[in-house]
Image (cartoon, grey):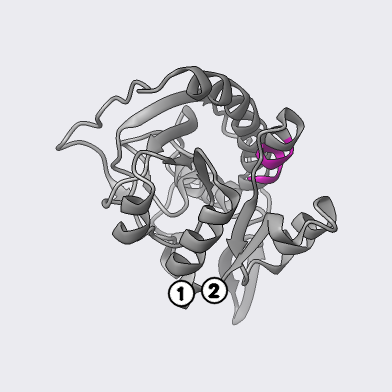
Amino acid sequence: MAIQAIIELANLGVLAGVALPESNSELWVEIQHMFSGKDEFICKLKKENFTGQSIQWLNNIEANCIFVMTFPWKLKEELLNQYPSRFYNFHYGLLPDNRGADPVFESIRSRHVETGITVHAVSNEIDKGPVLAVQKISLNHKITHGLLCTSLSMVGAQMCRALVTYLSREINPVLVPQPNNAGKYFPRPVLKDVTIDWQKMSSAEIYARVQACNPGNKGAYTSCKGWNFRVVCI
């Protein structure tokens, strides 16, 4: 979902570099193709020492602001303290009600009528930092995980353009604290979350689960007469 935002930032002439996990081989190929010949522009992070790598790389590129998008690892306090008030996470769901690793999946599975992107300052607590910006979009029951990711990627790019303008002129951007005792954290989906229970689930719940698993989980799990299937559409 970050590709469109990266392209937008590059077109604006404000992109200092891109860092990504080495395990994300698909994104790595795309980034290499986009920025061919600019090896110093890209940082390939290893999980075991990504904090030290990030600090060294950020010092080299002299970034004024760091946008975090779909990054899989928690940023450590050492890194946040090195660059105070410079990290902003793009959370592809609405906070505080939809915290967690896959808010796109949860928004569809739970049949929410709206979702969006919440940009918040990164703190020591996951998805609990004060909010910089929110952009909402409506949902309908026909949307799939793939279609929603595409829509959110475009929204994220639009928000980048607006935030670059805002942050360039505001020394102290307005941040709105999240309510202390509100919201819910949804962990990464496990097997039971992507499996259809024909006996206990309503038709609406089954439909929503299938949509939430298309194509991210390559369909919702089910079985019949000893055969295992993945349902991608109903």
Residue 52, horizontal then vertical, whole percent = 45, 68
Is residue 142 rendered to the left or right of residue 32? left
Residue 113, horizontal then vertical, whole percent = 47, 27
The part of the image, by quadrant, that contains residue 164 is top right
Is residue 197 rendered to the left or right of residue 8? left
Above or below — where is 95 with respect to 226?
above
Is residue 195 rendered to the left or right of residue 152? left
Closer-to-camera residue (67/13): 13
Residue 8, horizontal then vertical, whole percent = 71, 33
Magenta-tinted stretch: 1-7
Q: Which residue is mark 2?
A: 46
Q: Which residue is mark 1?
A: 49
Above or below — where is 188 with respect to 102?
below
Above or below — where is 135 with respect to 28?
above
Give the Cα separation between the discs numbered 1 and 2: 6 Å
Look at label 1 and name its amino acid: Asn
Image quarter of the N terminus: top right
- The residue lying at 32 percent from left, 60 percent from top is 78
Closer-to-camera residue (24/147): 24
Few, some or many residues within 10 Å of mark 1 (<14, 14–19, 20+): few
Whether label 1 touches label 2, CB < 8 Å = yes
